[in-house]
Amino acid sequence: MSTVLQPENTDIRSCLLCGVGGQGTVLASRLIANAAMRRGLSARTAETIGMAQRGGSVVSHVRIGSRIASPMIPEGQADVLLGFEPGEAAANLRYLKEGGTLIVCRQEITPVTAALGLSGYRGQDCLDWLRDRSRRCIVLDSEAICRNCGSPKVLNTAFVGALCASGAMGITSEDARQALRARMKPTLLEMNLRALELGAAAARGLISPQS
């Protein structure tokens, strides 16, 4: 059944998040939307999730603005692409607009086929390919950030921090901190606030003045 969409405002900003199950991409999309709403903006989200809860591809769409007809981002219209895994980022690069911001994780998650020797997948090859095709590419060392925070489960929050520092979606670290305080259990809050700041600091160090 076809759906007739109403015209959208031109103030919409769009972020596509992609990774694999278990990395927290869906929670990250909720944090971004919550941070935007704290600025008085509308936000809409949508997800497509692979067959496996862990290990399957996960793609989340986030769109913020004053009026949004559809949560789904057309190809070539994402202001930001958050790639929680290099191969997933490469597979979804077609969504990123010309001059958009790519934030991608340095570390790969090896697919089952590669682990069985059926594939020659290397995350570094994907990173090289992505750098060649994106003028504004921020590569996060997720292992270092997670090690500093004492948990591998803060990757999603670090990505939100990097997104805020990039300025590409018009939300600030303070917006994200408020969203974290509203959603996180008290026992996990400080760790995630630290990850937010480390992600932001890493992104600031990787964005050149000309970008």
Image: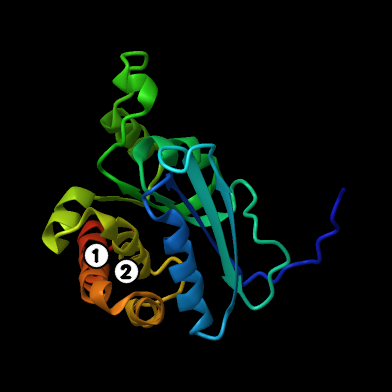
**Residue 204 tag number:** 1
**5 horizontally vs 68: left or right:** right
Considering only vertical position in the picture, is 27 above or below 124? below
Q: Position of residue 49 (x, y in %)?
A: 54, 45
**Which structural element holds mark 2?**
helix
| Crowd band around label 2 with a 10 angstrom C-alpha radius: few (<14), some (14–19), many (20+) | many
Considering only vertical position in the picture, is 75 above or below 41? above
Q: Residue at left 69%, top 75%?
A: 67
Near-viewer residue (144 or 90): 144
Separation of residues labelled 2 and 1 (CA atoms): 6 Å
**Which structural element holds mark 1?**
helix
| Crowd band around label 1 with a 10 angstrom C-alpha radius: few (<14), some (14–19), many (20+) | some
Q: Amino acid at mark 1?
A: Arg
Q: Is residue 124 visible?
A: yes
Near-viewer residue (132 or 34): 34
Say which residue label 2 marks: 165
Q: Is residue 210 visible?
A: no
Point out the image quarter for the C terminus. Answer: bottom left
Q: Position of residue 138 (x, y in %)?
A: 30, 52
Find out whether the residues at labels 2 and 1 contact each other: C-beta distance under 8 Å. yes
Considering only vertical position in the picture, is 195 above or below 130? below
Q: Residue at left 51%, top 71%?
A: 33
- Residue 21: image quadrant is top left
- Residue 134: image quadrant is top left
Q: Position of residue 81 (x, y in %)?
A: 45, 52
